[in-house]
Amino acid sequence: MLLPAAVMLGPVPSTAHVKVDIPHGITQREQLLELAKAAVQLWEAQRVLRCARIGQQHPSLEVPAALAIFRQKAHAAGAAVTAAAEEAEKRALKKACRQLQLALHPDKTPQQLAGQQAVFVEAFKALQSAQQLVPALSS
């Protein structure tokens, strides 16, 4: 049986105060935005790794998992695609690939995530493997 968090942790005193020291020249909003951006980058690296693992565990899903890394969908078998639509998808795929390369590059790991460097290295390798699986990116 799961208990509500208040029951498990006990009541929070109504006089509880949190004091945060903010250095001069930096606002709390800026610090929170930096922390949020770092958290999004880490989440994205973990998402890439999960997609790559799915492709490794299920060979029939290797290409769809690679496309999922780039947030693209595979076409249904036999679906007719115009040349213009195919070119637009190829451009979108290359743009998504470039954005992920910049976001996940191990040398661009945010300071807040310096301890998570190995996650970014592994995610970047998975990204490179996915690039080789997607025909539009390997040409």
Image (cartoon, helix red, strand yellow):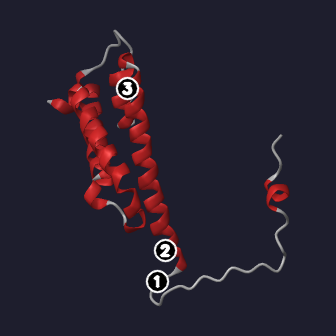
| Separation of marks 3 and 2 at Cα, in angstroms | 37 Å
Q: Count the numbered circles shown.
A: 3
Work out which quarter of the rendered image holds the C terminus and state it.
Answer: top left
Q: Secondary structure at mark 2?
A: helix
Q: Amino acid at mark 3?
A: Gly
Q: Secondary structure at mark 3?
A: helix
Residue 76 in sight from this viewpoint:
yes
Q: What label does residue 26 carry, if any? A: 1
The residue identified by callout 3 is 55
Residue 29 lies, with reference to residue 9, above or below; the image says below
Q: Please, which residue is most extreme toward the left here?
A: 139
Q: Amino acid at mark 1?
A: Ile
Marks 3,2: beta carbons within 8 A: no
Q: What label does residue 31 carry, if any? A: 2
Tell me which label, 1 or 2, sits earlier in the chain. 1
Marks 1,2: beta carbons within 8 A: yes
